[in-house]
Image (tube, grey):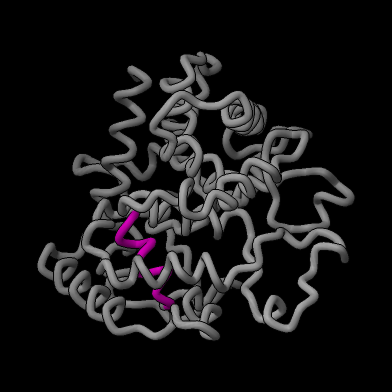
């Protein structure tokens, strides 16, 4: 892993950017989510590191205002969902996983979005498909009715991690169906033939933002099992640990890949903090902490 000094300086660099950025301002919302160096990604990296409180309050206020004023509050599935007024047409269209990540950052900071922007939680709960997951591709709601694991995890996490009361009947159903979806897919497998859907998901990734890896799914299921007092299928997490074993060393869990791939479809500029904590082959204290919690919760 990069030295603590390097990470500390990189955090300071992100803080300076968040203090001065104009990318949250009206008319610049699209710039705020620019892959991979828009301010939302700086905030997401800090959140995943457990350093969300280091985000400047001024950036939190601006980000919350962006969600309030600059986002079209409807997931566009059919022609009737498009905005019609000139001002609404200028608003950002979000997807489920993106909106859930934004939600988790602000909730972890201490915002009460369920009071201030209740439409976000309502959006997430509304778009579950019959198989238990969600899909950020609108066509799935019109034709296949099949979910995407990538699209599913952030919304599930948002409801599970940021509900500090008893779950409503709707929320409990949402989480239980989401867990069913992951269990039926054995975290990474096709229901049809049992093959791994994407071998990249077997490689621990950090920071993830919206991306999926097997540990992310394991972490959700372990916490869901605890919070909902539901048993997991025997051997499911053991199999997950076996799939991760090649990345486990004496010091913890090694990073297997970066979400940003200069040679792939998700290339783009990054930023110092991203590079400081995402080095392939390096032991990640953040992933190690998550892995240890899964093992502890599951008594493995």
For the question of whether residue 186 can be seen, the reply is no
Q: In which quadrant of the rendered image does the C terminus lie?
A: top left
| Residue appearing at x 57%, y 35% in the figure | 187
Q: In this view, does 107 lie to the left or right of 221?
A: left
Identify the magenta region.
38-47
Q: How many labels does the image show?
A: 0
| Residue appearing at x 74%, y 58% in the figure | 137
Q: In which quarter of the view is residue 95 placed?
A: bottom right
Q: Is residue 127 left or right of residue 154?
A: right
Estimate the x, y position of residue 296 in percent, counting from the top left.
Answer: 29, 24
| Residue appearing at x 18%, y 74% in the figure | 12
Estimate the x, y position of residue 241 in percent, counting from the top left.
Answer: 42, 31
| Residue appearing at x 45%, y 82% in the figure | 25
For the question of whether residue 257 can be seen, the reply is yes
Q: Is residue 241 above or below residue 145?
A: above
Estimate the x, y position of residue 70 in percent, counting from the top left.
Answer: 57, 73
Q: In which quarter of the view is residue 92 placed?
A: bottom right
Q: Is residue 81 above or below residue 37?
A: above
């Amino acid at each position: 892993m990069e030295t603590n000094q390097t990470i500390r300086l990189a955090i300071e660099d992100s803080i300076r950017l968040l203090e001065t950025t104009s990318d949250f301002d009206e008319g610049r919302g699209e710039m705020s989510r620019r892959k991979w160096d828009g301010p939302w990604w700086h905030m997401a990296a800090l959140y995943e590191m457990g350093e969300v409180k280091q985000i400047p309050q001024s950036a939190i206020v601006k980000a919350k205002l962006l969600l309030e004023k600059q986002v079209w509050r409807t997931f566009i599935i059919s022609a009737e969902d498009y905005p019609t007024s000139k001002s609404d047409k200028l608003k950002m269209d979000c997807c489920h996983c993106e909106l859930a990540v934004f939600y988790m950052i602000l909730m972890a900071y201490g915002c009460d979005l369920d009071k201030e922007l209740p439409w976000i939680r309502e959006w997430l709960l509304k778009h579950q498909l019959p198989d238990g997951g969600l899909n950020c591709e609108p066509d799935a709601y019109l034709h296949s009715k099949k979910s995407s694991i990538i699209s599913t995890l952030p919304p599930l996490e948002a409801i599970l991690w940021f509900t500090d009361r008893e779950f409503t009947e709707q929320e409990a159903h949402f989480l239980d169906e989401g867990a069913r979806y992951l269990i039926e897919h054995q975290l990474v497998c096709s229901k049809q033939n049992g093959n791994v859907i994407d071998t990249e998901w077997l490689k621990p990734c950090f920071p993830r933002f919206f991306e999926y890896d097997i540990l992310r799914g394991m972490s959700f299921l372990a916490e869901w099992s605890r919070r909902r007092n539901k048993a997991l299928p025997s051997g499911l997490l053991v199999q997950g640990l076996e799939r991760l074993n090649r990345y486990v060393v004496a010091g913890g869990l090694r990073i297997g890949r970066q979400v940003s791939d200069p040679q792939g479809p998700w290339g783009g500029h990054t930023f110092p903090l991203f590079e400081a904590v995402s080095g392939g082959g390096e032991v990640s204290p953040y992933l190690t902490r998550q892995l240890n919690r899964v093992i502890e919760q599951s008594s493995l």
